[in-house]
Amino acid sequence: MKNLLLLPVFCAIASILPAQIQLEHTYGKGFLKRIRMDVSGEKYVLKQVFCHLSLYDAAHTPFAELTLTSGFNGCNDVLFSEHLLDADDDFEVLFNWLDDGPGLDVGASVWNDGFEQEISSSGYMPVISEIAGGQTKLLVGPAVFALPGPVPEHHYGVFNRLERKAFPVEGERYLTYNWKYFDGFHFHNSDHVLLKSVDLPLPDFEHLDEVSQQYFNDDAQYEFFGTRSQSPDNNGNDALAEVVREDGITLFSEPCDYASINKLPGLPDRLLVNGYSAPDVKRQKVYDAPSLTLLHDFPFYTERVSPDGVSDYYVRSTVQKDTLWLYNGNFQPEKTVVPMTGSNWNFGFSRNLFSGSGKLELFFTTKSGPGLSGTKVLCIDEDGALLYAFPGATAARIDRQPGMDDKFFVTYPDSIQVYDFVHQSTGAVDVPAGEGVLAVPNPFSTEFDLILPENSDYTIRLWNTAGQVVCSQRIVGDARATILTGDAIPPGIYFCSVTGTGFRHTMRLIKYE
C-alpha cells in the first residue's frame, strides 16, 4: 500500500493550508471507474484481467462480482444500469468486446440476470442516445435498438456513420452518411423515414465534425462544420476549416492544420483553428463559435481548460511541459508555472480543491529515472509551491460527477487509491454538508435563489442527469445568490453543487415548464 507523502515545502505552510485530501480506500490493480446506478446509487467498478468486474458501494464495501465471457480479454464496460434493459432492480451491463478470431472482430453484448446476449458483431461501439423530449435509444453502428430491451428497431444498411440529434426547428433526426462511398448526408425522422439528403458542392467535405441548426445562423437550414483537404498553401496549411450551410453557402473558411469546436460546460464555445502563419511557424486563431467572430490570434498552439467550470484558461507549454504559460479568458498572460525540470505529462487543472487557497492548482506525472523508473505524481499551485507528492504513482485524475462528491484517483502499478477532498480550513467555520443551504423555489421555472451559510466565496454548478454542467456561477463575498437559467435548459431533474471554503453540498432540483 502506498502512502501519501507531504513534503517539507508543504509542511512549512501547514498552519495556513492544512491537508485538504484524505485517503478513503485502496483498490487492487485494474481499471477503476465510479458510476451512479438507477436505483442503488453511487458505485465503484474495478475491472481486472479476463473481464472480471468487482462492484463496491459508496463506502467501498463489496456489492457484486461478475466475469464477462464474450470476446477475448478485451471487454470494455460501457454502461451499468438497473432499469435500462428491464423493469427489475438487478444490475445490467452493456459492453463491447474484442474477439480473438482471425479478424479480431469487435462486437457488443448485454449482461443481464447472469446471461450474456450478443446484440452486434459489426465492429461498432454501442452508444446510449438520450435527447430532450425523446426516448432513450441504443445505437450500434447503423443499427437502432429501442429500450428497455434492447429491441431491434431499425437498421440503416450500408451507412457506416449514424448520429441522433434534436434540432431546434426540425426536432428529432437520425443523420446517416458513408465516409467510404460518400453520397451525401441523409436526414430521417423518428420513424426512420428519409426526409432530406444534402450533398454539399465541395470536394472532400465528408469528414464531418458537427451538424447543427440555428447555431451559426438564424435560419432553419442545417449547418455543417468540418475540415476538408487541400493542396498545402505557401505556409504549409493542408486543410480548410469550414462552416457550410445546406444550400452550399460557405459561412466560414480558414486555412489550417486542424480545427475543432471547444466546448467547456458552462462557458462559451470557442472555435480553435490551428495552422501556420509561415512555414513551420505555428498560430492559433480563437473564434467565438456561434458568431464566428475572431477573438484572438496566438503565435503558438494552446490548450483551453477550465479548472473550476467558471473561468477558462489557455495553456501553452514546452515540449517537455516543464514550463507552462497561462493566459486568461481575455487572452492576457496571467502566470508562468515551472513545475520541475524533466519530462512531465498527464496534466490536470483545478482550483481550491487541494489547498483551499483559491489558487489555480496543477497535478501531473513526472519521473526522475530512465524509462518509467522514478515515476511520481505531484500537485502544485499556480506559484509552483508543492502541495502533495505521490511517489511511485503513474497517473491521477479528478472524478467529478453530478450528485456526488468530487474524488481524486491516484494510480500505481499495483493499486489505485481514492481520496476525498476534506475542505477543512483554519480560516472558516467547518459547516456540515447541507446545513444552512437552501434553494427556493424548488421546483423552479426560470430562476431560483440560493441561501448560503455565510458571506464567503462559492462556486455554483448546475448539472443535468447526463453529467453535463448546464450553468455555473461564481459568488464572491456573499451569502445569497440568484441563479438565472431562463429557458436555456429544458424541464427536468438537475443537481446543484455548492462548493466553498470549508464545505461542499449537492442538492436535487426540479425545473418545470
Image (tube, grey):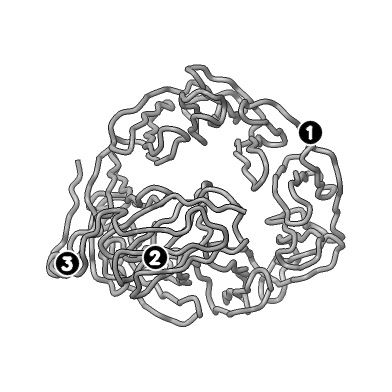
The amino acid sitting under disc 2 is Thr
Q: Position of residue 323 (x, y in %)?
A: 36, 72
Amino acid type, callout 3: Thr
Circle nearer the N terminus (2, 3): 3
- The residue mark sitting in front, 1 or 3, is 3
In the image, taking residue 317 as reference, residue 23 lies left or right, namely: left
Type of amino acid at the residue the image marks with label 1 = Gly
Q: Name the residue under label 3.
A: 426
Which residue position holds label 1? 157
| Residue 245 in picture, x, y percent from top left | 81, 63
Residue 185 position in % (x across, y down): 81, 49
Q: Quadrant of residue 32?
A: top left
Task: Locate the C terminus and report the quarter of the image it occupies.
Answer: bottom right
Q: Depth check: 262 or 468 in front? A: 468
Specify which label sits upstream in the sequence, 2 or 1.
Answer: 1
In this rendering, position of residue 56 left or right of residue 171: left
